[in-house]
Image: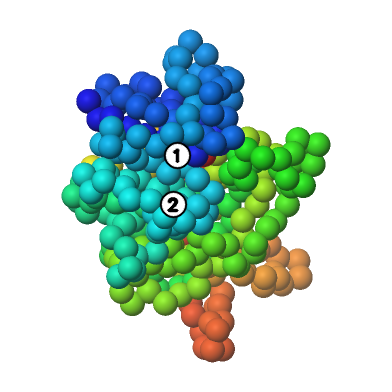
Amino acid sequence: MIKVGIIGGAGYTAGELIRLLLNHPDAEITFVNSTSNAGNKITDVHSGLYGETDLIFTDELPLDQIDLLFFCTAHGDTKKFMESHTVPENVKIIDLSMDYRIESPEHDFVYGLPELNRRRICNAQHIANPGCFATCIQLAVLPLAKHLMLNSDLHVNAITGSTGAGVKPSSTSHFSWRNDNISIYKPFTHQHLAEIGQSLRQLQNSFNSMVNFIPVRGNFSRGIFATTYLDCKIGLDEIKRIYEEYYADHSFTFITDKNPDLKQVVNTNKCLIYLLKQQAADRFDDRQPAEGSERPSSPQHEPPLRLGRDGRVASEAFSVLINIQMMIYR
C-alpha cells in the first residue's frame, strides 16, 4: 500500500482528493493536515464523505511515515513549506498549487499532465499538477502542436464553475452574486497562460502565436466548458484522425461526434472533445444577389475572398472550432 499524507486538507481540492484516495485499492491515507481544523472529523468539513471515513484532521506532520505527500495548499504556500521543512528524500510529492508548474533549474518538479508527460511522470520524484483551465486548453490543441500545426493565434472562451475560486466565499463566488450571473475576469492575462505556452512549445518549438483567452465565471459549481478556434488548412477527417491517434492511449480523453454538454463530464474524470471545421470564406460572403435574382447556393459560386492581416488575399484560410467539456477536480 502507498501511504499518503495531505497538507491543506480543508479545501475543495483536498475533499475530492480524499474521496479518490479512499476508493483507491493501493492507497492508504496516513494523515490529513489542517491547522484550522485540527481535532475535527474529516466529515465535519467534507460532509459528502459521511460513511466513508473516520479520519481526523491533524496539525502534525509525520512525514517519515508516508510514501507520498500531496499539497492542496494556496498558491505560494507549497514553496514556503519546501523552503522551511525537510521532506525525506524517499517521499514523492504531488503539488496541486501553481508554485512549481513552470520548469526551472531551481527545482526538479515535472509538469504533471499525463497526456503530455506520461513517461516523465512515471519516473518523477516531484510532480506539479496542471491548472484547471490550462489542462482544458492544452487538451484542446496538443494534437495539433505535435504535428506542428499551431501557426495562427488561438482564441479561447472558457467558463468555469464556482468551486475553482476556493472554499472561502468572496465577492464573486458567494451564491447571491454567482447565481443567475456570469462575468469575465483576467481577460488575456490569466495566470495559466504561462504553463499553456510552456507545454505547446514543448511539442512545437516554433510556437509563437497569441493565446487570446477569455475566462468566464459560470453560475454552476463544477466543470469547465471551453471553446477554442484557430486557422487550420487540413480537412476535418484528417484532424479527427490526428486527435484520435493522439489520445488513443489516454484513458480519460475522448473525441465525440456530437457536441457535448457539461453534465456529461461533471463528477467524472472525463474530457470530451468535439471538432468542427468551417471554411473561413463561407463566413464572410456578404455579396448581395442582383435585383430580382436569388443568391446562388455555395457550391454554385466561387467563394468570396478574405483579406489577410497584411491586406493580401487569404482565400485558403480555414477555421477549426474545438468544443471541449471536462471535469476538473477542485
Which residue does the image show at 35% across and 27% down from the upper left? 30
Considering the numbered disc 1 on the image, is that residue within a helix, a strand or a loop?
Answer: strand
Q: Nearer the viewer, residue 22 or 135?
A: 22
Residue occupying the far right of the picture: 176
The picture places residue 273, in percent across and down from the top left corner, at: 43, 45
The chosen color scheme is rainbow
Which circle's residue, 2 or 1, is located before the other in the chain?
1
Q: Nearer the viewer, residue 150 or 188?
A: 188
Q: Position of residue 113 (x, y in %)?
A: 34, 50
Horizontal placement of 45 versus 64: left or right? right
What label does residue 81 carry, if any? 2
Circle 1 residues within 10 Å: few <14, some 14–19, many ≥20: many
Q: Of the residues shown, which amino acid type is indicated by label 2?
A: Phe
> Residue sitting at 25 percent across and 30 percent down?
2
Percent position (x, y) of residue 205?
31, 74
- The vertical placement of 9 against 183, above or below, is above
Residue at image coords 31%, 47%: 87
Q: Are marks 2 and 1 in contact (CB under 8 Å)?
A: yes
